[in-house]
Amino acid sequence: MPTALVTGATAGIGAEFARQLAAGRYDLVLVARDAARLEAFAADLRGQYTVDVEVLPADLASEQGLTVVADRVAQGVDLLVNNAGIGLNTAFTKVDYAEEQRLLRLNVEAVLRLTHAALPVMVERGSGDVINVSSVAGFGVLAPGSTYSASKAWVTNFSQSIALSVRKRGVRVMALCPGFTHTEFHDRAGISKKGQPGWLWLSAVDVVRDGLRDLRRGKLVSIPSVKYKFSVLLLRHLPSTLMYRLAGDTRGKGRQAGT
Ligand SMILES: NC(=O)c1ccc[n+]([C@@H]2O[C@H](COP(=O)([O-])OP(=O)(O)OC[C@H]3O[C@@H](n4cnc5c(N)ncnc54)[C@H](OP(=O)(O)O)[C@@H]3O)[C@@H](O)[C@H]2O)c1
């Protein structure tokens, strides 16, 4: 059976990747920091599906955690899902540098390092897939002072660039760019969800289903749902002066425009 390694696998989009991949008969390697929660989730999956589930507790914002996971990835996996990511809810001029550094390490460096560890084996075999979970927030400067959007712009651009370099070798790399999705993300960052109307929110089930379908179709960028495809189209073609007018620094005020 093929093996998939999913980072940030105990909650939200990552947990849903684990479920849908187990249902699709992938053996799993699950990564997150909370070892007890990882073990409990792995036991659930083993009980529900006939797949092997390995757990790898690691903090991907630390050098030590990244090394452990990169070593496992370099042993060979068929699908790597770089999903773990965080947002912040503090204005840039007030935030601790250590928090910004943590965001950059997790949202950017971990994606870089694990993709770099995965691809040589995949290219050698002539097969393999990488999904990097990015965000629609990476398509525009809607939350001034948000380094989250910048980190996701990097993930989307990086994924497309690497995808073009390896696709003739039988390897697929895709950026998955969801909009607002019901997960633990906003609560963890202390970002209120009240500012966004209900119709804007996606379910992790739909996001992952669309992402896996788009990977099979060979897309380089997947934007789940028609409403967010349309939003991205607007963001790409809006005159920058209009975008700057629409942008509002809501960080540190209980809600944030970036997801
Ligand atoms: N939710 C949204 O609206 C939304 C929209 C667009 C894009 N995204 C992106 O989707 C991805 C998944 O987000 P989510 O909404 O599913 O988040 P979530 O529900 O908060 O889940 C985050 C997962 O990542 C793990 N994690 C957090 N920090 C980690 C670290 N330093 N090292 C290893 N694992 C870590 C968490 O487990 P532990 O705490 O145990 O480590 C958990 O399993 C992120 O890249 C996010 O930027 C989310």
Image (spheres, rainbow, N blue to C red):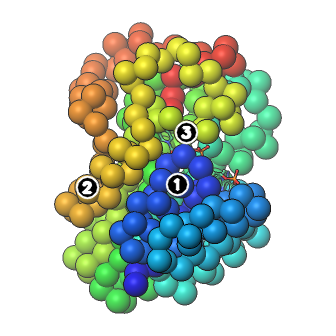
- Mark 2 / mark 3, whichever is N-terminal: 3
Residue displayed at 71% across by 58% down:
37
Look at the image and tell me whether residue 257 can be seen: yes
Q: Which residue is mark 2?
A: 214
Q: Which of the two residues, 114 or 57, is positioned nearer the viewer here?
A: 57
Is residue 139 rendered to the left or right of residue 94? Answer: left
Residue 242 % position (x, y): 34, 13
Residue 201 % position (x, y): 42, 28
Q: Is mark 1 within 8 Å of ligand 1?
A: yes
State the mark number for residue 14: 1
> In the orientation shown, which residue stands out farthest toward the front?
47
Mark 2 neighbour density, 10 Å: few (under 14) some (14–19) many (20 or more): some
In the rendered structure, are the residues bearing label 1 and label 2 in contact, judged by CB atoms less than 8 Å apart? Answer: no
Q: Is mark 3 within 8 Å of ligand 1?
A: yes
Q: Which residue is mark 3?
A: 183
Q: Is residue 139 above or below residue 211?
A: above
Q: Secondary structure at mark 2?
A: helix
Residue displayed at 31% across by 75% down:
171
Q: Secondary structure at mark 1?
A: helix
- Mark 3 / mark 1, whichever is N-terminal: 1
Residue 255 % position (x, y): 60, 18
Is residue 40 rendered to the left or right of residue 108? Answer: right
